[in-house]
Image (cartoon, helix red, strand yellow):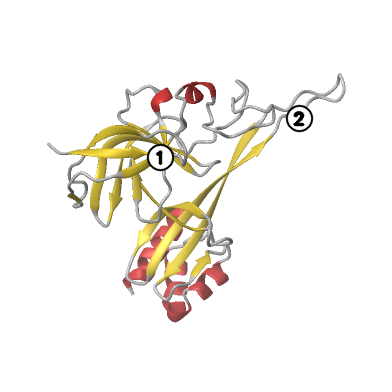
Amino acid sequence: MKYLSFVVLLFFMNLLHAQFETSKLNGAQAMEPTKFGILTTSSPSNYARINSYGTVFNDGSGELSPDTKGSPYLEDNFQLGSIIKDSLVFAENIALRYNVYDDIFIGKITLTTIDEEAKYVIKSPEYKIKMGELLFVALPNDVDPNMLQYYQILVIGAKGTLYKKNIKTFKARIMATTSLTRDVPPSFSDKEQYFFADFNGNFREVPSSKKKVIDLMNDKKKEISQCIDKNDLNVKKEEDLIRLFRFYNSL
C-alpha cells in the first residue's frame, strides 16, 4: 500500500504533514509518494472560528449568519475526490469542498475527519481536482493572466475544451429603514460563464446567442447551424451546450 505525503505550506508558517492513499482512478496510474501542497494557517482554531475559511463578510467576521440565504460552496457537504497530475493520481478518496466565492478548494483526509482539520489546497495549473463526478483545473484568469481561477471541464475533444466558471456573488444584509420595512438577510447568488479554448491558443467566452455561438465555431458553421436546428438546442442551457460542443469536436 502506497501513501502520499502532503506538504502543508504557508510562507512563514510551520510545516505540517498528512498522509493520503494513492491508487488508480479512471485509468489514471498511481505514482510513487510525492509532495503536494495544502495551504493552512498556524492555528487550527481558525478553522473552527471562520466557517468561510477566511472570507470577511458584512459583519466584519468570517461567520455566516444563520439567516444567510445560499452558500459560498458549490456543495455544502464535503465530497470524495482525487488530485491528478498528467493522468497520475496524487491522492484518492480525500474529502474536498469547493468554496466558489473565494475560488479555493478545501481538503481533509476523510469525510469523517473533523472540519477544523481541513486545509486549503494550493492552486496550481499542474493539477486537476476531481470532486465527485466533476473535474476542475486552475487556469489563468481571462482578464488577468497572472491570476489563476478554477474552471470546471465540461467537454474535451479534438478541437478544444469547453469550460464552466462557477461564480458566487455575495449581497450584504440590508437593514430596515422604517417600521414598515423588513431586514433583507445576506445572500449568495449563483452565476455561470462558459469558455471555449481551442488548440490555436484562443480562450473565448461562449456567447449566449445562437448566431454568436455559431460564429465561435466558424470553421463548421453550416454543420453547427444544422445541429442546433435539427436537435432544437438552446445555447443558453448547459446540457445543450455540452451536446453541441461534443458534436463540434466530432467533426
- Point out the tag, 1 or 2, that comes first from the N-terminus: 1
Q: Please state the horizontal and vertical placement of residue 241, each as a whole percent of the image.
A: 45, 60
Quarter in which the N terminus is drawn: top left
Q: Please state the horizontal and vertical placement of residue 147, each as a whole percent of the image.
A: 53, 56
Q: Which mark is residue 174?
A: 2
Instruction: Determine which residue is flagged by label 1.
Output: 9
> Residue at 47% across / 61% down in the picture?
233
**Image height check: is 89 above or below 40?**
below
- Name the side, left or right, on which 231 lies relative to 59: left
Q: Residue furthest left?
A: 1
> Residue at 30% across / 39% down in the picture?
6
> Residue at 48% across / 78% down in the picture?
218
- SS of the residue under disc 2: loop
> Residue at 59% across / 25% down in the picture?
63
- Name the side, left or right, on which 136 lies relative to 64: left
Looking at the picture, which amino acid does disc 1 mark?
Leu
Q: Please state the horizontal and vertical placement of residue 131, each as a whole percent of the image.
A: 35, 41
Q: Residues within 10 Å of mark 1 (few under 14, many from 20)?
A: many
Q: Nearer the viewer, residue 135 or 143?
A: 143
